[in-house]
Amino acid sequence: MKITILGCGTSTGVPMVGCKCPVCSSDDPRDNRTRASLLICYNGHTVLVDTSTDLREQALRQRIDRIDAVLFSHTHADHVNGIDDLRGFHFIHKKIIPCFASRATLDTLQNGFSYIFDENQSSGYTPLLSPNEISSPFELFGQIITPIPLQHGRTISFGYRIGNFAYLTDCSAIPEPSLELLQGLELLVIDGLRWTEHPFHFNITGAIAAARMMHSPHTILTHLTHQIAYSERNKLPPGFELAYDGMEFDLS
């Protein structure tokens, strides 16, 4: 299984529009962060987590030529507003892509992007996605995918576990039942927004504490703001890293 962090930035991306801070002005390419998303490749299939606002840029950069399924974490704009960029893949393989999400997330997506899901002869659009509601583990291309409910401020988002890997973006707390689903990981990618606290996201200290409750031996912090430079990775304890766009892992 190959894991690629397509984007590790927060909702503004980094550099942030109009900002001239040291991180936004950095010459280190690892400080350039597109909006958060992930690619998982296994058994000859490619699964995308979230249609980031920057999906087209990410797909071109990583030379992605097909998407076989999409997992949605929640409906905040930075995680869904690249949904139209799935059209390019449809032009190539002519298939409607299955997507998976909670009922609440699907309802919001289908209301906001009805043309993505429904045939509309007057518009000329062809459906791109077929919706699948999930609330418990399900099989996808020979792997069990486990949705992980997460607290994201006052709302709920989904993380996902596949084998010994888990991706937990956009979370401020992990409910006890979800923690039980996250034991025995080999690799964890988790929201670690910045050093200071935030009401809707783990800060770095909170993400480290959460990862330790999961006993994760290797943890990557993602959804990073311009308030943290990649060079600050040396401040992290052993077993922890900062994400960067294009970061890859191969897991057995």
Image (spheres, grey):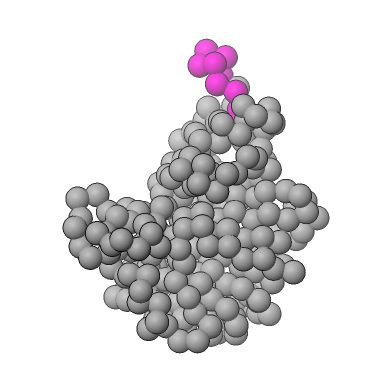
Q: Is residue 239 left or right of residue 163?
A: left
Q: Position of residue 152 (x, y in %)?
A: 44, 64
Q: Position of residue 178 (x, y in %)?
A: 60, 72
Quadrant position of residue 89: top right
Quadrant position of residue 95: top right
Q: Is residue 60 above or below residue 199?
A: above
Q: Out of 237 and 74, give the one closest to the viewer.
A: 237
Magenta region, residue range: 120-128
* Residue at horizontal 65 percent and vertical 29 percent from the top: 92
Q: Is residue 64 left or right of residue 78?
A: right
Tell me the quarter of the image containing the N terminus.
Answer: bottom right
Q: Is residue 184 left or right of residue 195?
A: right
User: Does 121 appear in magenta?
Assistant: yes
* Residue at horizontal 53 percent and vertical 83 percent from the top: 239
User: Does 194 appear in magenta?
Assistant: no
Q: Is residue 210 left or right of residue 202?
A: right
